[in-house]
């Protein structure tokens, strides 16, 4: 919370400062100031704000001078100071050179301030050396403990010397105030000349020797309205003259301040003009020990630059030629600044050797100085394959914050370039680095589409590299992208490529992606795809085998027994007889097949045992509830060898030899298998259930309504009475006319008719009537076979063959009554009692 409060207070202070200064200044119409970062100019009166141009969002720096700082001055000094500042910025705006600060918006004045905009500025050299006057408090973090590298000093001095060469030779202008306050370091680390407040222009006519008018230093004026005495050349006092050599003296004093302890000037004069005069006299006999802090390769040239005689000082061109600047780093930075002058062939040669130099340079120089020069080449696609490795090399030594801020924004447009193809190849080779530094959102929005394009390219090497790096960031790919974008592209490449190595790499990539997929995506997308691959090379088969093994052994995935039995094994088993397999490959394949078969066997047996146990439990329950039967079961017929072969295969219930109602034995435990604790628990539960059913009270039956008692019928008496009634009936006249007179009653035995006493017996009536037990009454008409009569076969055959023949019943006519005596017989016969009837029939 304290950090937030500090940040809020600093922002509030910045806003309040800007609102008090910039409102009313025309610069605010085009530029937005965001942060107070540095100060520069005479007495560091110019405040430097970080900001941007509103229309283009281009980064910029806004220089602001607040007039209230002059309130304690006299009116004359205030007017001189304001005029001096206006003149200096006006002169700066007219100059265009790489080593001179570039003005983006000219000076604007309001009642409270002066302001103008420039290229992005890091700080003034005075700020870097520890002068924090007119700076924000606390000091900005980018300036805390800031230390210049020797390479930065070398190249910075070289840039200032080049700027002075331009001013002296081309513009014919003396700066007249080279000091740390008038040197500005831009955002890329380049040193730029600033502070032309006291510059002197050449007044000579064209073609004549240069002439720079001289104004004597006035101690009565305010020190800030005149050049800084610590860096002022001695000829100002000694000869009241100045020349381009005076700026070289000032540069020599800057070199001393860069190397001295505490970055103090050599004379440490301050604003004391009398002390400056004494120091000028000491310069004539300056001991070499005073310059011991200066670097060895530069010390003797600094002594020469600080010589009291201007003619003995080297000019800027000579200064640039000293061995001190013969440094590979300096030459590299100088070459980068002049790249626009070279053709593509020369640039490519330079970029090829640049990685060796980058590894020896300080990282800050690589980020702020080399990287901006390299990124300018990204607009030239043929040069990108030469520049990109250097940019990625800088990224290797960068922190994640530096990469996101400075490198990633310039790499995003490059990721979209597909021609030349080497660009994709370089990105694939450095993909691990990109994934390590790039945030997850940018990986999804920029890097993943680039990988899709790599999979769809025609270059084999790019495809293989892409397949090798995809699993490294599979965790960053969401499920829809994995299912709908990545997997279909890999499968399409695997099916369509003509290179075995690409196909094998596709399978390896899929195998590495398995742990990032869910079970159903593997079963739906991966497993059915493998048999479709149009290749049977051993390497491809082993890749397929590896995916099966991973899916089978992975704890989260696993292949179901149904998939193994119906899809995987029918594909793998024919591969076991492929002739191209080596012994090790065959062993791996057959081992996996056995493993799958064993897994199918184990799982399905466990399922069937579970189902069988459920069936057995139900049978035990039924057996315990049903009463024991007393029915006898016939012994099964002896089994032949052929029957034994089909025994136990589950077809016994459908066999003819197997009785349908034979009760199956109820096994109490699995065959020859020791009982597990689960089996024991299950059997104990079964026994407990049976025990509960047995000990339950018998249900009370609901009594049925009483039925009427039926008196048993005496069938013998009923039969006798029926026969007697039939015998007592009169025989019709048609039948009696053909029969002779016979006794009225036939002799009847107990069970059937007797044929003794029948004359002229042509038929064996005993045989023909045998079995005619219950039919005691003869028919009154022609004899027809009743449907329910129980005749023997002979009688039935005779009736069938002689249906149209007239039967001869003459033998029975003597037994039947005639028409004349029918009535008499009926009247004279005494009705027999039951006992008499029984005696008669006995």
Image (tube, rainbow, N blue to C red):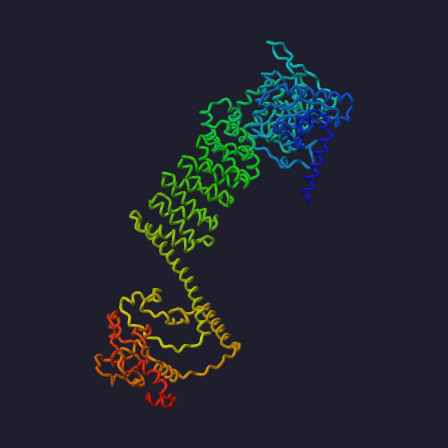
Whole-percent x and y of residue 114? Answer: 71, 24
Q: In this view of the protein, which residue sits in the foreground, 106 or 442? A: 442
Residue 185 seen in the figure: no
Q: In this view of the protein, which residue sits in the foreground, 484 or 323? A: 484
Q: Could you tell whether 179 is left or right of 765 in the image?
A: right
Q: Quadrant of residue 560?
A: bottom left
Whole-percent x and y of residue 47? Answer: 68, 29
Q: Could you tell whether 639 is left or right of 350 in the image?
A: left
Given the current orientation, which residue lies at the most extreme front position? Answer: 820
Q: In this view of the protein, which residue sits in the foreground, 92 or 438? A: 438
* Quadrant position of the N terminus in the picture: top right
Residue 701 seen in the figure: yes
Work out whether 105 lies above or below 138: above
Give the residue drawn at x 56%, y 37%.
404
Whole-percent x and y of residue 706? Answer: 51, 79
Whole-percent x and y of residue 17? Answer: 72, 32
Work out whether 613 lies above or below 141: below
Work out whether 510 lies above or below 736: above
Q: In this view of the protein, which residue sits in the foreground, 460 or 658? A: 658
Q: How many marks?
A: 0
Q: Quadrant of residue 422?
A: top left
Q: Could you tell whether 124 is left or right of 543 in the image?
A: right
* Quadrant position of the C terminus in the picture: bottom left
């Amino acid at each position: 919370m304290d950090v937030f409060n500090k940040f809020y207070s600093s922002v509030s202070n910045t806003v309040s400062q800007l609102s008090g200064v910039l409102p009313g200044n025309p610069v605010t119409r085009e530029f937005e100031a965001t942060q107070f970062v540095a100060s520069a100019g005479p007495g560091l009166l110019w405040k430097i704000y970080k900001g941007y141009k509103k229309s283009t969002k281009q980064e910029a720096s806004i220089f602001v001078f607040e007039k209230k700082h002059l309130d304690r001055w006299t009116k004359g000094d205030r007017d001189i100071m304001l005029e001096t500042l206006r003149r200096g910025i006006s002169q700066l705006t007219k100059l265009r050179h790489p080593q001179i600060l570039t003005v983006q918006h000219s000076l604007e004045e309001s009642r409270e301030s002066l302001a103008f905009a420039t290229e992005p500025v890091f700080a003034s050299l005075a700020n870097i050396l520890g002068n924090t006057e007119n700076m924000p408090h606390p000091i900005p973090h980018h300036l805390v403990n800031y230390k210049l590298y020797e390479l930065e000093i070398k190249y910075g001095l070289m840039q200032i010397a080049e700027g002075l060469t331009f001013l002296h030779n081309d513009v014919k202008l003396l700066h007249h105030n080279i000091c740390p306050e008038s040197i500005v370091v831009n955002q890329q680390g380049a040193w730029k000349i600033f502070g032309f407040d006291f510059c002197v222009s050449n007044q000579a006519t064209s073609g004549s020797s240069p002439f720079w008018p001289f104004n004597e230093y006035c101690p009565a004026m305010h020190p800030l309205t005149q050049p800084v005495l610590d860096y002022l050349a001695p000829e100002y006092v000694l000869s009241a003259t100045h020349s381009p050599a005076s700026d070289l003296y000032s540069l020599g004093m800057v070199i001393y301040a860069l190397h001295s302890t505490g970055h103090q000037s050599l004379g440490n004069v301050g604003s004391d003009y009398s002390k400056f005069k004494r120091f000028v006299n000491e310069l004539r006999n300056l001991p070499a020990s005073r310059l011991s802090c200066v670097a060895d390769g530069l010390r003797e040239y600094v002594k020469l630059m600080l010589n009291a005689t201007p003619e003995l000082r080297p000019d800027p061109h000579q200064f640039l030629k000293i061995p001190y600047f013969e440094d590979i780093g300096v030459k590299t930075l100088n070459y980068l600044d002049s790249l626009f002058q070279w053709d593509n062939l020369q640039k490519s040669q330079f970029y090829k050797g640049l990685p060796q130099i980058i590894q020896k340079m300080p990282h800050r120089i690589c980020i702020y100085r080399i990287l901006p020069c390299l990124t300018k080449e990204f607009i030239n696609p043929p040069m990108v394959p030469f520049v990109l490795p250097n940019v990625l090399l800088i990224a290797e030594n960068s922190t994640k914050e530096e990469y996101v801020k400075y490198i990633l924004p310039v790499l995003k447009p490059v990721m979209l370039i597909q021609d030349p193809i080497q660009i994709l190849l370089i990105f694939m080779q450095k993909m691990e680095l990109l994934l390590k530094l790039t945030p997850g959102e940018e990986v999804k929005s920029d890097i993943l589409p680039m990988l899709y394009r790599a999979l769809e390219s025609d270059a084999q090497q790019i495809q293989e590299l892409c397949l090798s790096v995809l699993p490294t960031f599979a965790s960053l790919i969401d499920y829809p992208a994995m299912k709908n974008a990545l997997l279909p592209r890999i499968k399409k490449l695997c099916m369509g490529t003509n290179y075995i190595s690409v196909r094998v790499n596709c399978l390896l990539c899929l195998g590495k992606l398995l742990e990032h997929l869910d079970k159903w995506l593997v079963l739906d997308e991966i497993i059915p795809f493998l048999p479709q691959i149009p290749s049977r090379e051993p390497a491809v088969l082993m890749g397929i085998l590896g995916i099966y093994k991973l899916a089978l052994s992975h704890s989260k995935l696993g292949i179901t027994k149904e998939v193994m039995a119906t899809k995987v094994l029918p594909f793998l088993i024919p591969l076991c007889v492929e002739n191209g397999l080596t012994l090790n490959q065959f062993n791996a394949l057959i081992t996996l097949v056995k493993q799958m078969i064993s897994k199918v066997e184990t799982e399905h047996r466990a399922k069937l045992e579970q189902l069988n146990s459920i069936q057995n439990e139900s049978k035990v329950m039924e057996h315990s509830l049903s009463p024991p039967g007393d029915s006898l079961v016939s012994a099964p017929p002896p089994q032949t060898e052929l029957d034994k072969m089909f025994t136990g295969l589950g077809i016994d219930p459908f066999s003819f030899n197997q009785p349908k109602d034979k009760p199956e034995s109820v096994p109490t435990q699995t065959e020859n298998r020791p009982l597990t604790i689960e089996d024991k628990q299950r059997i104990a539960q079964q026994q407990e259930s049976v025990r509960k059913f047995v000990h339950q009270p018998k249900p009370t039956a609901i009594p049925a309504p009483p039925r009427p008692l039926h008196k048993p019928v005496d069938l013998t008496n009923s039969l006798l009475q029926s026969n007697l009634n039939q015998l007592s009936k009169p025989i019709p006249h048609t039948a009696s006319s053909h029969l002779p007179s016979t006794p009225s009653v036939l002799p009847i035995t107990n069970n059937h008719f007797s044929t003794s006493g029948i004359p002229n017996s042509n038929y064996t009536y005993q045989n023909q009537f045998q079995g005619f037990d219950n039919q005691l009454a003869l028919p009154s008409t022609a004899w027809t076979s009743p449907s329910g009569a129980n005749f023997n076969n002979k009688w039935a055959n005779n009736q069938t063959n002689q249906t149209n023949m007239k039967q001869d019943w003459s033998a029975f006519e003597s037994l039947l009554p005639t028409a004349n005596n029918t009535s008499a017989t009926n009247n004279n016969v005494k009705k027999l009692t039951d006992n008499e009837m029984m005696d008669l029939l006995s």
